[in-house]
Amino acid sequence: MKKAQLFLISFLVSMVSSLYGQAPEGPIRVEMRQENGAWQLYRGGKPYYINGVGGQSYLDNAKAYGANSVRTWGAGEAIAILDEAHARGLTVLFGLWVGCERQGFDYDDAKAVKAQLDRFTEVVKTYKDHPAILMWGIGNETDLFYSDFKVWNAINDIAKMVHEIDPDHPTMTVTAGLDVAEVQLVMERAPHIDVYGVNTYGGLIGIDKEIRSFGWTKPYVITEWGPNGHWEVPKTEWGVPIEQMSSEKAQSYQERYEKGIAADKEMCIGSYVFLWGNKQETTPTWYGVFLEDGTETEVMDVLEYEWSGKMPENRSPHIADITLDGKGRYESVYVSPGATCKLETQVTDPDGDVLQYKWELLPESTDIKSGGDAEAKPEPVEIVLRPGSAGGVLNFKAPKKEGAYRLFAYIYDGNGNAATANIPFYVKK
């Protein structure tokens, strides 16, 4: 997709970096104004709508496809890409990772709370004038599995400090989804927060009505959005979630952008898509808009269209179905140890490209965390091929060891695009 354009962007960035060596000095003022009942973000005195990416990789792709901002979660991530982002004309939502109760942080420990504030104070003093900074993201999903409401007081103290040191950039905090209790707590205990950030997936459409009904009157940003979350989908009989195929995800992204994000022109000032990169979270394909090897999926076609107004010159393969022994993903497929099984996919390519198929067999992940915390990918299981495998058909021998597995299909078009799908199954005597 746009390989010539990506090369040109990379070349220009290299030229800028060699000429200047570092980002120009001086902040670019960012502010919110309420005009005719609608919130408008301004940067450098000009209206600015956030079409952002959540992740710090593939910045040339982000620029080429029409994105304008990058979200980071922690100060280390932000510091590492400030100059890179600025050279490409991208802004940075500078993340300050606030301690989470689920990770062991104790808000009854006054020394720890003060040390956190002091650490962030030095970060803000050091980087507040960098021209790439859009706003400060103070905390991410600190409300997940917590009980100590003092976290909001601590967040407010950080936001107050930011306002005192840096009058040029707004403050934001981010919650996991939207809940009336959290909205009220932010309003009551953290009045120095300027923008509400919401991480939301299957529940995105309707957030505009909820946030108003919960009493929030300031602007908000959808800080993570994407496919159906692994906690939101149907499960097999043995309790594992069923992932959308890449083409189903693309449809979800389009609907959520058009009917949720872009539809609220009064309070929503933009969004950050998740994940601009790749990670293991339940599966290695669930959230990343890139595969592990950097290949793009049909989701990227949708994002480029929504950000730039046009589809890419070469589009991704479209997958319509995946079955195992004639059964679909929602039928809780059981197979016998060592049995010969047949996986079938239905894939088309809008450009008529010749398709190549790759398969991966993984045990079901048991390293499941919460809040996006790091997970380890299971070690692949060898696929024993049986006669008759060709194209979108894979005949293989089931593992002999009982347990839960997941078979992944990757279908490449030879132009940097792919379709993906997986089907869970259980080996049982």
Image (cartoon, rainbow, N blue to C red):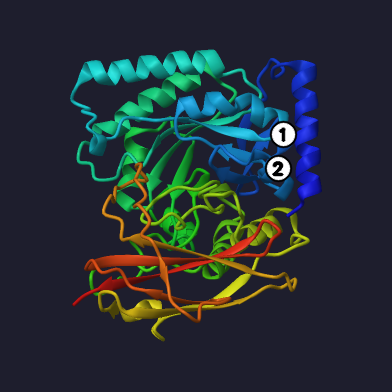
Q: Position of residue 350 (x, y in %)?
A: 71, 73
Task: Name the residue type under label 1.
Answer: Gly
**Count the marks: how many?**
2
Q: Position of residue 393 (x, y in %)?
A: 51, 78
Please name the residue shown 29% across and 47% down the image: 369
- Label 1, label 2: how far apart the Cα atoms are: 8 Å
Q: Residues within 10 Å of mark 1 (few under 14, many from 20)?
A: some
Of residues 96 and 27, the one nearer the viewer is 96
Of residues 294 and 335, the one nearer the viewer is 335
Q: Is residue 273 visible?
A: yes
Of residues 311 and 306, the one nearer the viewer is 311
In terms of image quadrants, where is residue 210? bottom left
In terms of image quadrants, where is residue 56? top right
Sequence-first tag of 1 and 2 = 2
Task: Name the residue type under label 2.
Answer: Lys
Mark 1: which secondary structure?
A: loop
What residue is pinned by disc 2? 63
Q: Residue furthest front?
A: 387
- Say left or right for 164 vs 215: right
Of residues 105 and 117, the one nearer the viewer is 105
Q: Residue furthest bottom?
A: 326
Q: Position of residue 303 (x, y in %)?
A: 64, 57
- Say left or right for 34 vs 19: left
Q: Please give the label number shown on residue 89.
A: 1
Q: Residues within 10 Å of mark 2 (few under 14, many from 20)?
A: some
Q: Badges 1 and 2: C-beta atoms under 8 Å apart?
A: yes
